[in-house]
Structure formats: C-alpha cells, structure tokens
Image: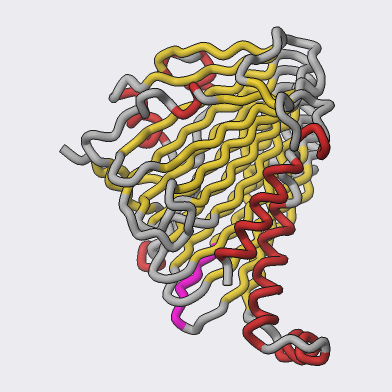
Amino acid sequence: MDQNLQVNGLPVKTYRFLKVNETALTVPSEAGRGDPGMYDHIIYRAANAGAEAAGREGAVSESLPDCISADDVVFADCPEFGKTPGGMGPEADSLFADRHIGAKVIRTVGGTEDVGVLIVNYSAKPNRSVLEPLVVHAERDSEITIIVNILEEEGSVCAASKGFLGFSTKLYAEVGAKINLIHVFRPGRGFTCFDDIGAYCEENAQVTLTTLQLGGGEVILGSRATLAGDCSIFENHTGYYCSGHTSLDMNYIVDQYGKDTESEMIFHGVLADQARKTFRGTIDFKSGSSGSIGEEQEDTLLLSPEVVNKAVPVILCAEEDVEGHHGATIGQLSDDMLFYMRSRGYSDEEARRVIVQARLKSVAEHIPDERLRWEVGQWIERNIV
C-alpha cells in the first residue's frame, strides 16, 4: 500500500489558505534501496588530481584510501540518525526507519585534511522506486567532499519516463571537521524525487551544501542544519530550473544554538512555462546563540506569466545579540537588460537563454571536481534553452 506523508512543514505555521505550511508526498509501497545501492558505486579522486589528471586513465579509483571507511548498516541504527533531523521532517525519517532501509556510512579518520573527492555517478532507471540513504561522519579536524551526480539513463531533462527517487543524507561534523556535499539532480520530468538532508555541527565545524536541481517532475527538497557548537558554520548554495508543468517544494532550516555561529543560504532559481515552486527558508536563533549571524536570500527569475511562485523567508529569534538578514527577490527579465543584450547582437530568445544558463552555471561553479563542473556546464547549454 502506498504511504502518504506530510513533509516540509514550516517550523511556525502561517495562514492555511496560503497552502505553504507543508506539502504531501506519496511514496510507492514497493520503494526500497536499490539493488545494489547507489552508494556501493563510489569512485575516489585524490586531492592532487587536477584538470590534467582528471582526464587520464587511472586518475580515479574505486578503492578508498585508508583514512576513509565505508560500511553498510541499517539506517535507523546509526547514532547519527537521531541527531540529524532532516528538513523534510519526522515523517520522512520514519519512512526509512519503518522500512528498515540499509545505508552506506562513510567515516573519515580524525586529523585527516583534504582527503580528495568521493564521486557517485548514479543512473536514474525508469519505472523503478528507489530509496537511497547515506551517512557521512567526519571525525575531529578532518575534511571530506562528496559529490552525488544523478542523471536519467536517457540523459535529458525532458525525458518522460516515470520513476521514484528518494534520498536521505545525514551529515555529522565533529569538532573542527568540514563536510562538503554536492548534489546534482538531472532526472527526467516523469520522475518524482525527494532529497532530505540533516546536518549536525560541533564546535568550529563546518558543513557546505551545494544543490543543482535541474530535472524531475515533482521534486521535494529539505535541509536542516543544527549548529550546536560554538563558531560552527553552515553554507548553502542552491540553483534550480523548473519548466513545463513541473513542481518544486523546498524547506531549508538552520537551528543556531552555539555562540558565534554563522549560516548563509543562497538560492538562484528560474521558473518557466506553467511551473510551480514553493520556498520556505528559516533561520532560528536559539537561546544562547549570542554573537551569531544568519543570512538567507532567494532570487527567482520568472519567464512566464503562468508560473506560480511562493516564497516564505523566516527568521525566528530567542536571543538578543544576533544578526539576521533574509529576503526574496522575484522578477522578470528587465527591459534594460534586454536592450543591453540586443545592443550586443543577441535576439531576445538568445538573451533569455544566455541569462538563464549563466544563473545556473554560477551555482555549478561550486562543484569542486573540474571534469564534472565542465560536464554539467555543457549539459546546461544543451538542455536549458
């Protein structure tokens, strides 16, 4: 029997008629971990594998270095599971616990800096329902970068084959540790997808999240970062493109508990045709978070009068000595911009394409792997028109 969930709930509810307090998600009864799971196909690129090395045979390896371990466990049995609630809420976590989904757990040895990049290239197969969990635990004073690259087998954002993809990632950064997570989503428009992330930072720890959402028909994104330790940091950069009749629902939350914590959440998006999008972004300064700073900014470009765009930027505060900034900018291509592009020889259609692609590529620039960054840029030029 399919399972109906209520996810992406606002921490503080607003008027019901706005229809932004939460969203509904139906999970197929047959959804389970892929066989084998996508995280069984991890490749490793050493930190010194630059642009030239990335193009040579032998630059990547499926063998992890001694400073990184990868184990399989039941997701709900991981100690990190209960400490890192995701942005989609408790019903999403219960989904994985109730179905006893197995997870890949990646750990770094304490004191190991700049271990390189772990890359997961995942082919989204049509007519399958898959749940894929991952736990990343960076021990004290270590650093790790993981890229999850998801592309439908047919390779086009316009592909119409159906499927269901659900991802849950738990990030735990011990004292002084750093975790960099990059998600690049490019499934076809027939896919229903969700991506739920929970992060926990101890003292002086940092988590950086980069998400490029470029495909899927119905997409739900959730992220919740807990800045528990003093001087901990959370950074987020998200780019999204929605066209046709697709929908995107986002819920990003930062809970700042420690003193002198910092958070920054930046979103760049494009809506075209009859696309629908709901954005919720919450910075919550908890009691005891004195000296903390938080900023969130969403910038959405509307390319059609038929799009539906909802934005709910929120700041909650239980502490006096904090600094918070939030806002949402919504607009169309300005006449001045179009006039400038025409003066440079571009037609209106060419100008539109160049501006949209540049907006998405600005987020792609945060991908640390040069070869994948180039490949994503080429994909944007071919598919985002």
Answer whether residue 211 is visible to the viewer in this image.
yes
- Against 191, residue 30 (above or below) is above
* For residue 171, above or below residue 28: above
Q: Which residues are magenta?
A: 306-311
Main SS category, magenta section: strand
Magenta stretch: includes residue 348: no
Render colour scheme: secondary structure
Q: Quadrant of residue 16?
A: bottom left
Judging depth in this view, the residue of 87 and 214 nearest the camera is 214
Residue at the spot x=45%, y=36% of the render?
A: 167
Quadrant containing the C terminus is: bottom right
Residue 188 screen position, x and y as percent: 42, 55
Rendered position, 276 above or below 336: above
Q: Residue 367: image x %, image y %? A: 71, 44
Question: In the rendered image, which quarter contains the N terminus?
Answer: top left
Q: Residue at x 55, y 33 (%)?
A: 198
Residue 308 on the magenta span:
yes
At x 80%, y 26%, the residue is 47
**Most extreme residue toward the front, as rendered?**
57
Residue at image location 76% in from the left, 20% down from the top: 115
Query: Can residue 9 be seen at all in this image of the molecule?
Result: no
Q: Quadrant of residue 189?
A: bottom left
- Most foreground residue, 88 or 359: 359
Judging depth in this view, the residue of 295 and 34 nearest the camera is: 34
Report x, y in % for residue 22: 39, 52
Above or below, 251 relative to 60: below
- x then y, percent, for residue 323: 78, 49
